[in-house]
Image: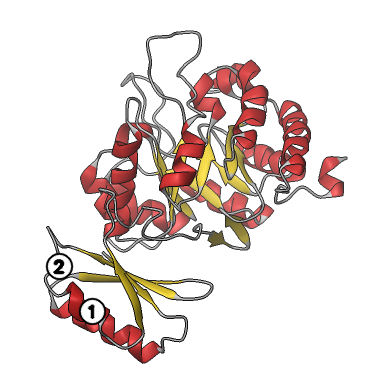
Amino acid sequence: MLVVMDAHATPEDIQAVCTVIEDMGLQANTMPGPTRTAIGITGNQGAIAEAARLKLMPGVRDVIRVTAPYKLVSREYREADTIIEINGVQIGGPSLVVMAGPCSIEGREQLLTTAEAVKAAGATILRGGAFKPRTSPYSFQGMGEDGLKLLAEARELTGMPVITEVMDTEQVDLVAEYADILQLGARNMQNFALLKRVGRTRRPVMLKRGLSSTVKDWLLSAEYIMAEGNQAVILCERGIRTFDDHSRGTFDLSVVPVLRELTHLPIIVDPSHATGRWQSILPMSRAGIASGADGLMIEVHPNPAEAWSDGEQSLLPERFVELMEQVERIADAMDRPIQGRTKAAAV
């Protein structure tokens, strides 16, 4: 349920409602808004017997039942878009964000060269995999903590926040020590122990859609994170598995406007993993921004032909510059400028 406070409700009114909710053995999730505060109630298995009592409390405007199976994630629960700010970079705000970097961190020179190139082109968040889930046990699995240290060095050099994947519960504290955003990959979208564990951190979490997951599955996985107290969740569409084989996956951009209706969470799209072909990344990036996404995640490598993982879906830095120039035109048409794109970056 959702308790909507009056615009003139005092902090004491809000705290009194929270206290009553907690006395019921439930959880009170306070969400300040531009004009009024809402308090979400979670932890109940059915109707709340004392809902009428809450409605009569000072400062309460209304008590609303949230009908969606996902509560905290739902647009019913929070009408305004969630905006996540990390070191001055906003995700989900009026401007767009681009995350870029190598699929796997292979060494200092490779990462720093790529970081400087994507920063110069206008990217605002650096991506790079220190731990890599691979289909084959014989493939490169990542540099581990040494890779995390290189990410921290790249952040110091460029000023960009960094995002990297965490693969299991034992890695969470280590990765959170170095990374600004924790990424949960498609294979871990329904790793419920991991969802709960990252939910107990206060690092923003980017949750990629599972290979064959429905929207409901995806949003309920996000609910696991938010139910543990972490409100900073980002959704990422990275392609789903269908019967067709013309690309690595089917890039389901039709999901973006659907998510806009269902949830207040920011939405990122990843054409690199979705298509698996560098030739498709530029047109699908344009389409992703046109569909209403809040930003892109793009793989960039200084020498894709020699990449240790996913070179076929990585852009050369000069192709990434071209992508940024073309995407900027789409963004301008939608009145959503790209963060980090200045006149100097566009030259």
Residue in view at x 59 percent, y 52 percent: 153
Which residue occupies the foreground of this view, 70 or 97?
A: 70
Task: Identify the residue position indicated by label 1 in the image.
Answer: 54
Residue in view at x 53 percent, y 72 percent: 34
- Looking at the rendered structure, the number of numbered marks drawn on it comes to 2
Res. 14 mark:
none
Quarter-of-image position of residue 242: top left
Which quadrant would the C terminus be assigned to in this image? top right
Q: Can I make out residue 301 in this image?
A: no
Q: Is residue 169 above or below residue 34?
A: above
Q: Can I make out residue 184 in this image?
A: yes
| Nearest to N terminus: mark 2 or mark 1 | 2
Q: Are marks 2 and 1 in contact (CB under 8 Å)?
A: yes
Residue 259 x %, y %: 45, 42
Disc 2 on helix, strand or loop?
A: loop
Residue in view at x 39 percent, y 35 percent: 209
Which residue occupies the foreground of this view, 184 or 331?
A: 331
Residue 131 x %, y %: 40, 38
Name the amino acid type tagged 1: Leu
Disc 1 on helix, strand or loop?
A: helix
Task: Identify the residue position indicated by label 2 in the image.
Answer: 48
Estimate how packed mark 1 is, as few (under 14), some (14 to 19) or many (20 or more) residues with alpha carbons within 10 Å.
Answer: some
Name the amino acid type tagged 2: Ile
In the displayed structure, does residue 188 sit left or right of residue 151?
Answer: left
| Mark-to-mark CA distance, 2 and 1 | 10 Å
In the displayed structure, does residue 65 sit left or right of residue 145?
Answer: left
Q: Is residue 155 above or below residue 283?
A: below
Residue 328 x %, y %: 75, 39
Residue in view at x 39 percent, y 63 percent: 202
Which quadrant would the N terminus be assigned to in this image? bottom left
